[in-house]
Image: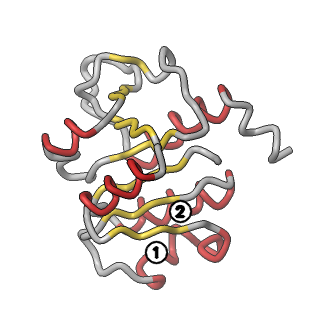
Amino acid sequence: MTPALALYQPDIAQNTGTLLRLGACLGVPVHIIHPTGFPFSRAALKRAGMDYLDQVELIEHTGFSAFDSWRKLENRRLALLTTKASVSCYDASFSESDILLVGRESAGVPQSVDDSADLRLRIPMRQEARSLNVAIAAAIVLGEALRQIKGFDTLI
């Protein structure tokens, strides 16, 4: 088992394509939780995903309840990346069963999704800054998770 990324109703095709490319490069599955804020197609993702779209394990879920049922059945811990969290991603202990969830670029996740998370994490940054791009945030936290579980060892 390897950690995974999950995108909650992504708004921006370019960020989704970038995260799919990240998943392909690091061997991490990417879950898309529908609906998306753009017509979900290979053509919409091609610019940012480039030729990596055939190399990523892409799992689509019809909605959050379907995703949440699946991940509970699989005994996976849900770690939500949110600016509202008090726990730094560098203070968390990650495991191979973690799924890192990022919210919509425009609105994050609703309270019901936040309440479903087993762990809420933030990236330390200046208080004057509101947030990072969702793809950059996911890359930072995924990198820390893979570092902790020695997930990069299989890539070298």
Q: Give the percent coordinates (x, y) of residue 40.
A: 35, 79
Q: Quadrant of residue 50?
A: bottom right
Tag 1 and tag 2, C-beta contact below 8 Å: yes
Residue at x 14% of width, y 44% of height? 112
The CA span between labels 1 and 2 is: 9 Å
Residue 61, relative to residue 135: is it above or below?
Answer: below
Q: Give the percent coordinates (x, y) of residue 99.
A: 47, 44
Q: Amino acid at mark 1?
A: Leu
* Eye-nearest disc, 1 or 2: 2
Is 84 or 75 nearer to us in this picture? 75
Q: Give the percent coordinates (x, y) of residue 47.
A: 51, 74
Q: Residues within 10 Å of mark 2 (few under 14, many from 20)?
A: many
Residue at x 36% of width, y 46% of height? 102
Residue 61, relative to residue 120: is it above or below?
Answer: below
Q: How many numbered discs, if any?
A: 2
- Judge from the rendering whether residue 141 lies leftward or rightward of residue 143; answer left or right: left
Q: Amino acid at mark 2?
A: Leu
- Judge from the rendering whether residue 35 lies leftward or rightward of residue 58; answer left or right: left
Q: In terms of secondary structure, where does tag 2 sit?
A: helix
Circle 1 is placed at which residue position?
Answer: 45
Q: In terms of secondary structure, where does tag 1 sit?
A: helix
- Judge from the rendering whether residue 152 lies leftward or rightward of residue 102; answer left or right: right
Q: Give the percent coordinates (x, y) of residue 37.
A: 24, 69
Residue 6, relative to residue 61: is it above or below?
Answer: above
Quadrant in which the C terminus appears: top right
Residue at x 50% of width, y 59% of height? 30
| Numbered mark located on residue 20 in the image | 2
Residue at x 41% of width, y 59% of height? 15
